[in-house]
Image (tube, coloured by chain):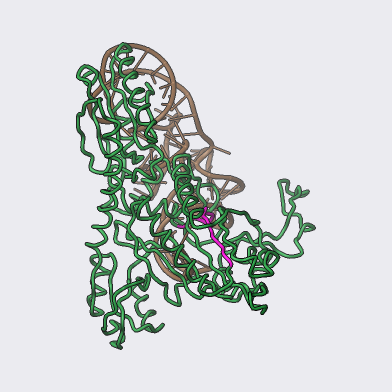
Chain colours: A green, B brown
Amino acid sequence: MAKVLTSKEENYAQWYNDLVLKSGLAENSAVRGCMVIKPYGYAIWEKMQEELNRMFKATGHENAYFPLFIPKSFFSREAEHVEGFAKECAVVTHYRLKTDEENGGLIVDPEAKLEEELIVRPTSETIIWNTYKNWIQSYRDLPILVNQWANVVRWEMRTRLFLRTTEFLWQEGHTAHATKKEAEDETMQMVNVYADFSEKFLGIPVLIGNKTESEKFAGAIETLTIEALMQDGKALQAGTSHFLGQNFAKAFDVQFTNKEGNLDYVWATSWGMTTRMIGALIMAHSDNNGLVLPPRIAPIQVVIVPIYKGGDEFPPIAEAANRIKAQLTALGISVKFDDRDTQKPGWKFAEYELKGVPVRIAIGPRDIKNGNVELARRDTLEKKVLPQEGIAAYIQDLLEEIQENVYQKALNFRLENTHRVDTWEELVEVLDKKGGFALAHWDGTKESEDRIKETKATIRCLLLNSEQEKGKCIVSGKPSNQRVVIAKAY
RNA sequence: CGGGGUAUAGCGCAGUCCGGUUAGCGCACCUGCUUUGGGAGCAGGGGGUCGUAAGUUCGAAUCUUACUACCCCGACCA
């Protein structure tokens, strides 16, 4: 078989890029740092949206939509927020083009300069809090539990398909609460929603924890994160949930009258998850044959490939295929019967492996004669010949088994690549040779954190619910009560 | 913004050092026949302002100059 993909072991970055392009998920666009998400990639995003919406609604949230443009003045209201985003903003300065009289072509009409520049949103806290000001007067108006599906733009220096593109798609939740406790609970609830989504739906195990002061969101009091481990040993921040305190309420003067009749500022949270998760999905599970999609996220769960020579062999195969397809569809399983005669079976096998379809059924004359099908599973690449009788129920169970197996495999990988380190030398060795998560004591100071950053690794998070353990900071030797997670990251 | 590199068919590249027929190869595409249980074989075919502009020359993909675009490394980051 012709080699289609770069080997993962040979060059991980190249393998990843190849995989995204050749599996038909996305491609680079003509616009710097942006990507085109192709139908197959978008179908995966839609599955994610569907599941996240279900989870958001189950926790009382509603969807809404706010403008793409943010007046510059809104943006500068929260000091840390500006600081964090100012360097990567796309700015609209004019609203009209005109014909260039001298050289032809189009130029920006200098007459059409905006009074106040508009920022293309890199995140929506400011425009949303400016709006919430009008929505909130009393504790009876609270809480506001709103989520938005949108695109945002961050003018990053360097980009990578799905992991960091100039424009990306995401959801951002923005909630307003009457009490600090309620907002803190919300922050915690949503990071747990993300962890559940990632583990149960995408099959990607995650660590949940707090970001350090220097790594948290610009404008947040506290940032909770889920951190996943990729197959090359690097960490990926997969979702964040921020407790914003009263920072944005104060910046946008959002006060309400509480039950006691006193004026108080509103408490806020925000939380987001992006198309980066498609990158996470790829880097967590795929192999050298292509994507391996957990069944719950797979746009196509089962593909049926017919094998036949002459035209006479096809009808009975099609009849069996359509019967099995109907049985599977009745069980809520998404099936594609690929009856194109423009591609050969071997080509189709390779193609659907590349696309990560969890289960493949092949039906040929041999199977028709014996009442069988050939069943292949993507995660283990095992093939079995099974009777057509009862195949739908068998596949239903198999999909569950694949979902669990894909998750277990990723979990085992993370366990094997999580190392407790007690000295600086051990940390450096783990980061250089093994990769993965290093668990180490840290004294909590910025100085020690900066020293760790010199290794190109960062403190990914301070684990929630981690056991208290006395130890010494690997940098300073000062006492510490808890290990933190250190890793190189995307 | 700093350092390095590239630009030739839809994609990936050779040719450039040392100028000289009609610019070539692989993949992809089209046609025909044979094939079809792991990305088929053979035969034929289509597709190029060689990044842009100027210069040197009898002659430029090749030499010179300027420009433009893109890629990689660093700072930034979901």
In the picture, measured across the screen, residue A376 lies left or right of residue B24, that is left
Q: Return the x and y of residue A475 as percentages of the image width and height.
A: 30, 83
Count the numbered circles shown.
Answer: 0
As drawn, the residue found furthest toward the bottom would be A478
Name which residue lies at 34% across and 19% down.
Answer: A318
Relative to A275, residue A448 above or below = below
Residue farthest along the right direction in this orientation: A111
Task: Determine the residue positioned at 29% across, 56% down.
Answer: A231
Give the image quarter of residue A144: bottom right
Residue A421 is drawn in which quadrant? bottom left
Q: Nearer the viewer, residue B10 or A438?
A: A438
Our reading of the magenta stretch's main secondary structure is strand
Residue A151 part of the magenta-drawn span: no
Toward the viewer: A472 or A58?
A58
Where residue B19 sits: x, y (%)? Answer: 42, 42
Q: Is residue B46 left or right of residue A373?
A: right
Give the residue furthest to the front. A260
Q: Taking A422 as reference, is A162 above or below it?
A: above
Residue A299 in the image: state x and y as whole percent: 41, 39
Q: Quadrant location of the C terminus of chain A?
A: bottom left
- The answer to whether one can see residue A73 in this image is no
Q: In this view, does A128 lie above or below B26?
A: below
Residue A234 visible, this angle: yes
In the displayed structure, A85 sits above or below A386; it is: below
Front residue of this view, candidates A112 and B47: A112
Q: Which of A181 and A204 is in front in this view?
A: A181
Q: Does A171 appear in magenta?
A: yes
Residue A69 rendering spot, x and y as whole percentages: 66, 58
Q: Give the range drawn in magenta.
A: A164-176
Q: Is residue B39 left or right of residue A101?
A: left
Which image quadrant: the N terminus of chain A?
Answer: top left
